Image (tube, grey):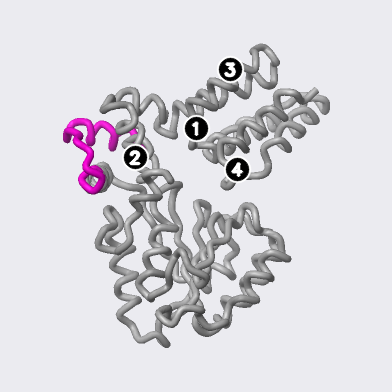
């Protein structure tokens, strides 16, 4: 398991850089159960802690994130009306654990839900079943329907500041017994694109490479501008067929563990190719390439990216 998952905060007091969101959730938990909001929409950038906060809330009401009362639905994959109906049928059932106050349902990447699925959830949000909390997590709140948003308690999760990233990195380093200078911690924080997840990926690289901060950052590529630039070069090679498969192999090694960021960068590049295309033949080819990368690979991870690149590479 990655360092990011192993060192996720388990209490609100262990969360850095999200004071407003933490204060809100603590205030909610102080309310009588009957008066609490039951539906939340957590809005923020990639890797800022949306699902982590939902998980901590679940723990706070006795719902074990590893148990049968906690449900995480990857809406970018399980977004059909059939899958969502299967989930909503479980809402309202009392928790399996006697320690849990309620069941918790987290819809990650909820902006990917198909319209019929979102409408099915809207009905549940209008009249939330007993012993149920619903969390919608999204990087694209503007894509969510007004009707659904109006039934949610909106919680904005801010990008991590350099100070918060440093504090979190130092906290994790102390937890795992890693010796690292303040200077290296600051350097990692500055190269993390304001993301707790990226910062811990770099810290893990640092540990694996014997304390070489430059190599740790290079391995991770910060998940930002360099990743996008390298991805665009790879796309150009796929389109123009002017490089060998070794380029893709090297790319996958460098960006191991960042498969979803890579997939989205590829889709963004190909989208621009379609918009700037000058012929039907070009549009047909770019559309076929996009189809290679439509499905996310949260579960397949690196293997999923290799498979998708191979399909695109060999496309006629």
Quick one: label 3, few (<14), some, or many (20+) residues within 10 Å? few
Res 112 → quadrant: bottom right
Instruction: Give the mark nearer the N terminus: 3 vs 2.
Output: 2
Residue 92, above or below 192 = below
Residue marked by disc 1: 256
Instruction: Give the mark nearer the N terminus: 3 vs 4.
Output: 3
Query: Residue at the spot x=62%, y=52% of the render?
Result: 76
Query: Pointers 4 and 2 in contact (CB under 8 A)?
Result: no
How far is disc 4 from disc 1 in space, using C-alphas? 12 Å
Residue marked by disc 3: 247
Q: Dot 2: what SS?
A: helix
Query: Residue at the spot x=30%, y=72% of the render?
Result: 26
Residue 222, above or below 240 = below
Query: Residue at the spot x=52%, y=70% of the render?
Result: 68
How far is disc 2 from disc 1 in space, using C-alphas? 15 Å
Q: Which region shows up in magenta?
A: 173-192
Q: Main secondary structure of the magenta part?
A: helix
Across and down, in percent, residue 31 comes to 33, 83
Q: Dot 3: what SS?
A: helix
Residue marked by disc 4: 300
Query: Pointers 1 and 3 in contact (CB under 8 A)?
Result: no
Q: Dot 1: what SS?
A: loop
How far is disc 4 from disc 2 in space, using C-alphas? 23 Å
Res 64 → quadrant: bottom left
Instruction: Give the mark nearer the N terminus: 4 vs 2.
Output: 2
Residue marked by disc 2: 199
- The extreme left residue here reads 182
Q: Dot 4: what SS?
A: loop
Across and down, in percent, residue 159 comes to 36, 48
| Residue 184 located within the stretch drawn in magenta | yes
């Amino acid at each position: 398991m990655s360092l990011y998952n192993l060192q996720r905060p388990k209490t609100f007091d262990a969360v850095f850089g999200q004071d407003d969101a933490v204060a809100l959730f603590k205030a909610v938990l102080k309310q009588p159960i009957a008066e609490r909001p039951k539906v939340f929409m957590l809005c923020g950038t990639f890797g800022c802690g949306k699902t982590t906060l939902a998980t901590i809330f679940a723990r706070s009401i006795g719902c074990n994130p590893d148990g049968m009362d906690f449900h995480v639905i990857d809406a970018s994959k399980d977004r059909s009306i059939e899958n969502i109906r299967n989930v909503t049928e479980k809402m309202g059932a009392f928790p399996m654990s006697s320690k849990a106050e309620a069941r918790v349902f987290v819809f990650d990447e909820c902006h990917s839900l198909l319209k019929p699925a979102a409408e099915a959830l809207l009905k549940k949000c209008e009249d939330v079943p007993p012993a149920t909390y619903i969390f919608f997590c999204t990087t694209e709140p503007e894509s969510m329907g007004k009707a659904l948003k109006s039934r949610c308690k909106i919680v904005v999760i801010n990008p991590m500041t350099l100070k918060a990233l440093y504090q979190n990195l130092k906290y994790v380093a102390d937890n795992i017994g890693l010796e690292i200078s303040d200077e290296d911690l600051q350097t990692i924080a500055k190269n993390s694109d304001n993301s707790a997840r990226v910062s811990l990926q770099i810290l893990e690289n640092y540990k694996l490479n014997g304390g070489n901060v430059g190599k740790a950052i290079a391995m991770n590529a910060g998940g930002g501008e360099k990743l996008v630039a390298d991805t665009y070069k790879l796309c150009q090679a796929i389109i123009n067929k002017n490089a060998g498969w070794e380029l893709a192999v090297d790319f996958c090694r460098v960006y191991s563990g960042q498969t979803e960021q890579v997939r989205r960068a590829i889709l963004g590049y190909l989208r621009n190719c379609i918009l700037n295309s000058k012929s039907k033949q070009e549009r047909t080819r770019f559309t076929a390439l996009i189809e290679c990368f439509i499905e996310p690979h949260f579960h397949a991870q690196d293997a999923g990216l290799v498979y998708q690149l191979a399909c695109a590479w060999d496309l006629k």
